[in-house]
Image (cartoon, rainbow, N blue to C red):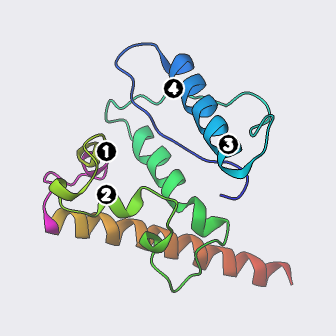
Amino acid sequence: MPNHFHVVVETPQPNLVAGMKWLLGTYTSRFNRRHKLFGHLFSGRYKSLIVDGSGNGYLKSVGDYVHLNPARAKLVVADVPLESFAWSSWPAYLLVRSKRPRWLRADRLLGEWGIPKDSPAGRQRLERALEERRGAEHYGEERAETAET
């Protein structure tokens, strides 16, 4: 996103405030040093929501929202796969476990989609499911535009 970012973070301890302070402060310092700038980089406080990963589908909804956001913002055109968006963790979800970052919990998202195993077939099923959802939303968008004309 050109003016904001989304992150889904699981914290075993209630330390999100300290973690976000560190993340945003460190990023701002390094960005300013690299670009010879100074001052605030982000305006306002970040927004946080509690996502209960208890299997009620909310984690899936949040994951879908984050991963479909570049397509909804038209940063990825319709005929290009979501995994082509460089500023997303989505491509890493589709990698074999040994190639993805250790902190990325693909098993949680796979489970929310009802995919029992982190396997090539499971990851392919996950990718297909999200691309189908994207296509359904795009189709609905076109229909809405036609209806407005």
Secondary structure beneath dot 3 equals helix
| Amino acid bearing label 1 | Leu
The Cα–Cα distance between marks 3 and 4, rounded to whole angstroms, is: 33 Å
Is disc 1 in contact with disc 2, using a CB cutoff of under 8 Å? yes
Secondary structure beneath dot 1 equals loop
| Amino acid bearing label 2 | Tyr
- The label nearer to you, 4 versus 1, is 1
What span is colored magenta in the figure? 109-120
- The label nearer to you, 3 versus 1, is 3
Q: Earlier in the sequence, mark 1 or mark 2?
A: 2
- The label nearer to you, 3 versus 4, is 3
Expressed as whole percent of the image width and height from the top left, the position of residue 37 reads 78, 44
Expressed as whole percent of the image width and height from the top left, the position of residue 62 reads 49, 44
Q: Which residue is mark 4?
A: 50
99 is higher (above) or lower (below) than 39: below
69 is higher (above) or lower (below) than 145: above
* Quarter-of-image position of residue 132: bottom left
Is disc 4 in contact with disc 2, using a CB cutoff of under 8 Å? no
Is disc 3 in contact with disc 2, using a CB cutoff of under 8 Å? no
| Residue 24: numbered disc | none
State left or right for residue 111 relative to residue 136.
Answer: left
Secondary structure beneath dot 2 equals helix
Q: Which residue is mark 1?
A: 104
| Amino acid bearing label 4 | Ile
Q: Earlier in the sequence, mark 4 or mark 2?
A: 4
Q: Residues within 10 Å of mark 1 (few under 14, many from 20)?
A: few
Expressed as whole percent of the image width and height from the top left, the position of residue 113 reads 30, 53
